[in-house]
Amino acid sequence: MAQRIKIGKSTVTTTPLGLGTNKVGGHNLFDGLKDEDGVEVVKAALEDGISLLDTAYMYGLGKSEEIIGNVTQDYDRSKFVIATKAAQDPNNDLKPNNDPKFLKKSVDDALQRLQTDYIDIFYIHFPDDKTPKAEAVQALVEEKKAGKIKAIGVSNFSLDQIKEANTDNQVDIVEDNYSLVHREAEKEEFPYLKEHQISFVPYFPLSSGLLTGKYTPADNSKFSRFSSRQYTAIMAALEKVKAIAVAHQATVAQTILAWYIKNQNISVVIPGARVADQVHSNAQAMDITISDDEFKQIDQLFKQF
């Protein structure tokens, strides 16, 4: 199966493809979710050799963590990696809170819901507007020393906030919005992360399904953030990706995921899934090796974004 990826300066290693679990118990985020589907999604990931489960308090206000905690009791804890996130304060309208006491309590609460002794990666999910970021990270350094977490992450932080959080070089991983059609992180964020041995995980890697190849030129209205010119360009680029996918007997989504896996700036890619079949399909991306030329071709097709 796939190689192992080291997370930042920590001891945590994982497969280059993980599972995003916002559709596992995330009833506050998505309509029509079934908990039994969420259970099967987590099982499918673990049985397909996907070792990273990426969750958060905000996914169902703890429900996603609870489902993962229940399912994983039947698996060898040393064989998979749990990443979770917290910041939204249930006692203050779910506004971000990076206060050290709040973060420490969030770690303890997540450990209970996940029914585990340690969390492999713990992220500050969103920055607040008052807590010095180095102080927030120091709280997680103390949790790390206590053995409760193994790696420290931040999510949705600006580059300046990442730098402040990493004052003492304690940040191991950053999770942020990035995809072939949302590439701002490449300019300044990626060079900083590389210089400081900080891993990067993109969320929305398939751009809410746009990069799976299932949409047509008539679906532009579903993706209003793109102008009609941009959307037409994306559709044309995906047609060319289809030719690469066919050569690998793969789907467009699998081929795009294989591009992320090959990308040196990306440590782990975490597509979500509503049902187990999507997990099985995504997992196959770990067995696809696109060539350097194919990597460059896909890169160029989406360069304008």
Image: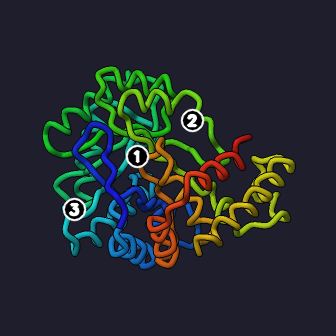
- Any part of residue 91 in sight: no
Front-most of residues 51 and 155 = 51
| Mark 3 or 1, nearer chain start | 1
Q: Nearer the viewer, residue 81 or 92?
A: 81
Mark 2 lies on residue: 185
Residue at numbered disc 3: 115
**Which quadrant: the N terminus?**
bottom left
Among numbered discs 2 and 1, the one appearing first in the sequence: 1
Q: Mark 2 and 3 residues: CB-CB less than 8 Å, in contact?
A: no
Expressed as whole percent of the image width and height from the top left, the position of residue 28 reads: 52, 60
Q: Nearer the viewer, residue 150 or 198?
A: 198
**Residue type (three-letter) at the residue carrying disc 2:** Ala
Q: Secondary structure at mark 3?
A: loop
Residue in view at x 30 percent, y 38 percent = 152
Q: Which residue is mark 1?
A: 90
Question: Picture coordinates of residue 212 (x, y %)?
Answer: 64, 65
Please tell me whether mark 1 sits on a helix, a strand or a loop. loop
Looking at the picture, how far across and down is residue 241, in whole percent? 69, 61
Q: Secondary structure at mark 2?
A: helix
Q: Amino acid at mark 1?
A: Pro
**Residue occupying the point 28% across, 51% down:** 13
Considering depth in this image, is 241 or 253 the residue closer to the camera?
241
Position above or below: 174 against 223: above
**Residue 98 appears left or right of 212:** left
- Is 94 positioned to the left or the right of 3 in the image? right
Badge 1: how crowded within 10 Å, few (<14), some, or many (20+)?
A: few
Give the colouring mode of the picture: rainbow
Question: Mark 3 or 1, which is nearer the eye?
Answer: 3
Residue 183 appears in the rendering: yes
* Residue 67 sits above or below residue 170 on the image: below
Which is closer to the viewer, label 2 or label 1?
A: 2
Residue drawn at (58%, 63%) of the image = 255
